[in-house]
Amino acid sequence: MHLKLVSFDLCPFVQRSVITLRYKQVDFDIEYIDLENPPGWFLEISPLGKVPLLIVDGETVLFESAVINEFVDDITPPRLQQDDPLARALDRGWVEYGSQCIMDQYGLMVASDAQAFEEAHHRVLAQLARLEQKLGDGPWFNGAHFSLVDSTCAPLLMRYAILNRRHRLFDDDDYPRLHRWWQALAELDAVRGSVPADFEDRLIAYLRRRGGYGPELFAGQA
Ligand SMILES: N[C@@H](CCC(=O)N[C@@H](CS)C(=O)NCC(=O)O)C(=O)O
């Protein structure tokens, strides 16, 4: 089966599919597009105009990262979804939660003024606190077994590690389980290789191009 992922280099949703594919050591091609100027062929095949897409055998187009990840999991070992339907449904909920966290993280990064930033900051800290509360002894979200919740949340935690270094958002000591979770994820080849080596520079360059209150907080200092 031939798999091609249609991608954008800074997209956290693409990254979660990349992590899933890499974790499972699945061969795939990747094609980057410019999301600010998307090619016609992409708009034609992407129902929501969003990346990622997974093109299967050159003809079937899967969209939505969570769906792509479940498909990849269904066709390749090791199994990352839980066998028990209730546990699997719960994981789906947390994958959805991770999506909302990613969107709110983006809202924080690009906040246009101090008030919008403060509101977003408040919201994301509450989100992180809920994740902290949900996490157990680790190393993974569900304990000993790596799951799609882990591949889903790694891009979120990677960005917080970068953002927090550039502008203090929270103290890692206040979120010890979250911190330990990120440290375990950051050790994985699947996560480390899921973005280009100069990812932080690219993210900062993007924020500088965008400008505004949030971007200046994170991208202002070298
Ligand atoms: N729910 C989607 C979200 C994907 C998404 O928002 N991708 C962004 C880039 S990070 C995108 O393609 N945006 C283009 C647009 O909204 O026009 C998923 O999980 O795949």
Image (tube, rainbow, N blue to C red):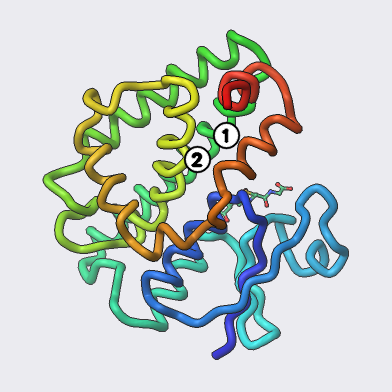
Q: Residue furthest top?
A: 115
Residue type marked 1: Tyr
Q: Is residue 97 above or below residue 108?
A: below
Which residue is at the front of the view, 121 or 83? 121
The secondary element bearing badge 2 is classed as helix
Image quadrant occupied by the N terminus: bottom right
The secondary element bearing badge 1 is classed as helix
Which residue is at the front of the view, 111 or 167? 167
Residue type marked 2: Ile
Q: Where residue 181 sits: x, y (%)?
A: 25, 46
Image quadrant occupied by the C terminus: top right
Q: Where residue 100 sits: x, y (%)?
A: 48, 39
Q: Where residue 206 sits: x, y (%)?
A: 69, 38
| Residue denoted by label 2 | 102
| Residue denoted by label 1 | 106
10 Å crowding of disc 2: few (<14), some (14-19), many (20+):
many
Q: Is residue 2 above or below residue 101?
A: below
Q: Is residue 66 above or below residue 131?
A: below
- Report whether 145 appears left or right of 1: left
Q: Residue furthest left?
A: 137
Residue beneath the point at 64% across and 20% down: 216
Mark seen at residue 131: none
- Report whether 201 appears left or right of 97: right
Under 8 Å from ligand 1: the CB of mark 1?
yes
Residue beneath the point at 81% across and 62% down: 43
Q: Are marks 2 and 1 in contact (CB under 8 Å)?
A: yes
- Report whether 9 appears left or right of 18: right
Q: Where residue 207 sits: x, y (%)?
A: 67, 32
Which residue is at the front of the view, 173 or 62? 173
10 Å crowding of disc 1: few (<14), some (14-19), many (20+):
some
Residue beneath the point at 75% across and 61% down: 33
